[in-house]
Amino acid sequence: MRKFIPKFVFDIYHYLFALIGVVIYGFPSKKLIVIGVTGTNGKSTVVHLITEILALRGAQGKIASLSSIRFKIGEKEEKNMLKMTMPGRMKLQKFLRQAVRSGCKYAILEVTSEGIKQFRHKFIDFNGAVFTNLTKEHIEAHKGFENYKKAKGKLFKALEKSKKKNLPRDFAEGKIFRGKFAVFNADDENSAYFSDLFSGKKYFYGIKSQQVEITPEKIGLKLDNLLGEFNVYNALAAYCAGLGLGIEKNKILEVLKSAKGIPGRMEIIIDKPFKVYVDYAHTPDALEKVYRTINPKSKIQIIPNQTQNPKLICVLGSCGGGRDKWKRPEMGKIAAEYCNQIILTNEDPYDENPNQILLDIKSGIPDIKYQILDRIIDRREAINKALSLAKPNDTVIITGKGCEPWMCVAGGKKIAWDDRKIVREEFSKIYGKL
């Protein structure tokens, strides 16, 4: 039935719901300094780091933040149990109203393309926006990469149109910052597209580009607490947002050098006798970055009759529900390039056949005789198998869900889940209590 209804009917529905929500809750964003963070990967970490920068560097007033991981209003936090990064229009406006009532002056929001598509960003008065990166994702939902990019771009259009508000006094120098700002990853080839949509104060960061003012070397950023090159990018994005908010650079660096990662993102669950990591990576680009972080020597070579030590044992799947089927063989191909042993397993099949999803991933894996490949539908069993295979100094990496609280299966059912909890339980079964 839904496919026969014209798109503009849904657009009107979503727009009206956004309008009703903001009216009911009294246009709360007008009383907040709102920063939106968008991109394919890294959004949750950047939201977390900006929140930490504000909280630990003297922000005058409480901070609210919203991401795929958590809802935070001042000291009160709750896990995001929605299986939805950006809440619906009513919930989002209600969150902002609660932030105002709790005395918050800042709201840091993770902004998704699907949320923008459904007008969830409408009637939010943004002061700043951050672009992390753009790779192929949600292509089927948006009917092409260009539409996906344009959806992300609407955040910067909204920033351009929002009325300027005075930000609070600079924590370090007592100045008042007037105006809006945007932050862009200059190493991403799509950065210029987003930058052209905004005419206010801009900050560009990068690692590779020689034209960029803000790089790890130039600001003296060295991270021992956040693993991977991708987290250097995330930290640079948060650093620039801190500058946009008027915070002194040395104070920002103090926070970044001590800030911890967020749950389910390159989180180490077991340290000895082998390492076990859990990560949310669910796109080909994110998956390769995670593997490369763990295995910096890059792609493995499978050699007959040679025991490779240490080994990288990978557990992965791919989301069902007809979403981004194109990426499944790509993820299989990447796993084959970096992992010594691969275990394909269930992730969030929804109403799709889990076996078919795993076969789609397997289709991208070359027929390498000396590489071990298993297909185990039961995700708990797959994790147990990976832990059983691991020897001292090996590394197990379990991707796709991170700290997500549910597994979505057929018939609209949700099974309570947390990869981190399952890892600890299965490790205890095999090796005894931690």
Image (cartoon, rainbow, N blue to C red):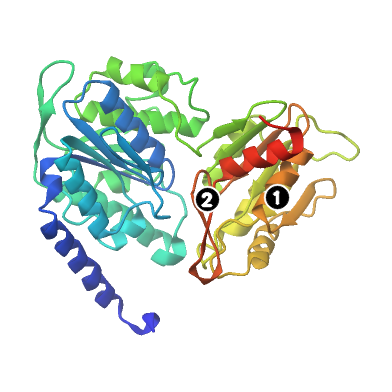
Please name the residue shown 66% across and 34% down the image.
298
What amino acid is found at the position of numbered circle 1 in the picture?
Ala
Q: Position of residue 230 (x, y in %)?
A: 48, 34
Circle number at residue 251: none
**Cα gap from disc 2 to disc 1, whole angstroms:** 20 Å
Describe residue 108's horizontal placement relative to residue 140 as left or right: left
Circle number at residue 283: 2
Disc 1 secondary structure class: helix
Describe residue 243's horizontal placement relative to residue 178 as left or right: right
What amino acid is found at the position of numbered circle 2 in the picture?
Thr
| Residue 222 at least partly seen | yes
Q: Nearer the viewer, mark 2 or mark 1?
A: 1
Please name the residue shown 24% across and 48% down the image.
95
Where residue 24 sits, quadrant-wise, is bottom left
Q: Quadrant of the C terminus?
A: top right
| Residue 208 at least partly seen | no
Where residue 278 sits, quadrant-wise, is top right
Of residues 379 and 360, the one drawn nearer to the viewer in this rendering: 379
Q: Is residue 153 above or below residue 69?
A: below
Q: Position of residue 228 (x, y in %)?
A: 52, 30
Describe residue 285's horizontal placement relative to residue 170 as left or right: right
Q: Is residue 28 above or below residue 167?
A: below
In terms of sequence position, does the residue under pointer 2 or pointer 1 come before the other?
2
Of residues 68 and 121, the one drawn nearer to the viewer in this rendering: 68
Please name the residue shown 78% across and 40% down the image.
389
Q: Quadrant of the N terminus?
A: bottom left
Q: Position of residue 106 (x, y in %)?
A: 20, 36
Circle number at residue 382: 1
Q: Is residue 394 above or below residue 409?
A: above
